[in-house]
Image: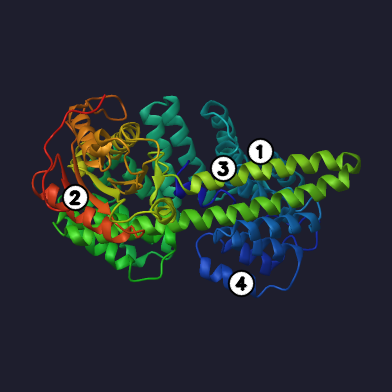
Amino acid sequence: MSGDATRARTDACGVAGRVAGSEDGDPALERAWDLRQDHPTEFARAVGALPRSPAATLLRGRLAQARLAWDDALRLSMEAERDIPDGTRWHARALEIIGHILVVLQQDDAAVSYLAAASDAYDLAGCQIGRASSLQNRAILGFRTDREALPMLLEALELAETAGDDGLTGTILLNIVEAGERLGMPEPARQAYLDRALRLLRGSWRDGYVKARCFQADSLLARGDTEGAARMLRDIPDPSTIATLEARCATACTLAELALRQGDPERGIQLTRACLGEQLPAFDEQMVRRTLSRCLEAVGDLRGALTEARLSADLHARQLGENASAKARALDVWHRTAQLRRDRQRQAARADRLEQALAELRAAHERIRELSIRDTLTGLHNRQHLLEVADGALADAGPQRPGQVAMIDVDGFKKVNDTHGHPAGDSVLRAFGQLLRSHLPADDLVARYGGEEFVVIRPPRPAPTDPRDEADAAGLVRDLDGFRAVAAGTQWRDHQGEPLAPVTVSVGVALITSPSLEPALLHADQTMYAAKRAGGDRVWTADGCPQPAVSPRR
């Protein structure tokens, strides 16, 4: 299953019989390993108390992985894999953890090799649960089609059932449900798998059960089935009673989304604000603030909704940057370590392999850099990149050579999401971003600012030499009013190609008369909201004057 409810246990290997290797079966090491999923604080404390050993090094790598410190996770795991004897559970675990990290780093071929090696190593160590976990990982992380993955999942299910690990059995069942749905498995069969999965998780892995329920409810809400989602969440515990922050935040957001659909946004506000009373990881805080923003908007607190949306966008941008940096360092660790391994094995081909590894590293860094400045949904630049490059683009801005900035908001976008579901809203935002980018000159900076808000910056243009060009010196209003007309006349469609109601935009435009973007952006934002309050589907300037509609340029 691609959701968090499954991925949280994909590296499971329960306690098996003692096999070769002095550390296999060590009670302190096994206790620490068993804490890694549901008790992160206790896991960190247990790992910190372990004496130095190769297995303890692997556990420190697993702890770094949980904290998204990919460079430390890869370095420690590869050091442990090198030092732990073959034929032991800990060696198999090391191979599997390295495979997981390489999946995140998009080193697909290497990841598949490590996951396959882990499966063989669990067989060698006689660890049946590890073998089941490894088969599941190879099915869902090994870049296989659903038709190829399903037999592996069924084999993993048989092993997990025989070993009596209800938590692992439940997660494998959820993966079978998801793969079966895409392959057209009959509804009664899928429902039977799902009911059994939830029953097993409820008795063996409370947080996994809660997250699985929420994941299923999110899918139902995305399809517009509010009643089905309510039934799925009927016996979900209060978020305040859930042990781990990740599960607590996911539960609160799902319950808040349901409350929003049921017309009780105040309940959603209460649930999400309760989560914000704690120190949250950036990803969870971003998710909670995004949900809180939607609830505040529903009760008419637009200022509060905008504040939360911007905080969520800031967290997302910062997380992208930090994650990209950690991944770049991890890729460096991976390539350097892999190079040393290859050097030991084939010294004669060392120079050629080093050149290839460095080229791959440069390409990976470039991919990471590009991903860090792009909005993943629309493909436009993201807010972080816009703010980083704005000063350079506006260095020459002044009263005689002003730049221009526009804040653009999709009118009634919440209605699209509420009526047709988030996939339809995502489809509109993707098409909207492409249309906006295609309608403006290539040197305009165009970015998704957050949610359904977009920003355009037009840097100062050279002074016109021909009087006939003077009308173009500040032509962003004209261009965007043309875009507005095209957007209003476009037949928008959802993710399944079904037609949607017309989508319009509200636009605020301001001049930039100094190298600082912030004052002009604030004016454009205020102007955009004034245009929206006036009914939307219009372009206004910061002096408060509505702009007449024009025909789009051809």
The residue pinned by badge 1 equals 112
Q: N-terminal of the two: label 1 or label 2?
A: 1
Looking at the picture, does residue 438 appear above or below residue 525? above
Disc number placed over residue 528 in the picture, else none: 2
* Crowd around label 2: few <14 · some 14–19 · many ≥20 (10 Å): many
Q: N-terminal of the two: label 4 or label 1?
A: 4
Residue 470 left/right relative to 98 = left
Identify the image quadrant of residue 352.
Answer: top right
Is there any visible trace of residue 408 in the rendered image?
yes
Q: Secondary structure at mark 1?
A: helix
Residue 522 left/right relative to 332 = left
Q: Residue furthest left?
A: 534
Residue 221 point in image, percent of width and height: 27, 42
Name the kind of residue labelled 3 in the image: Arg
Q: Residue furthest bottom?
A: 49
* Crowd around label 4: few <14 · some 14–19 · many ≥20 (10 Å): some
The residue pinned by badge 4 equals 46
Which residue is nearer to you in this view: 471 or 545? 471
Residue at (34% x, 57% y) in the render:
312
Residue 119 left/right relative to 137 = right
Circle 3/circle 4 CB separation < 8 Å: no
Nearest to the eye among marks 3 and 4: give it: 3
Residue at (65% x, 50% y) in the render:
331
Disc 1 to disc 2, C-alpha distance: 50 Å
Looking at the picture, does residue 370 appear above or below residue 388? above
Nearest to the eye among marks 2 and 4: give it: 2
Disc 1 to disc 3, C-alpha distance: 20 Å
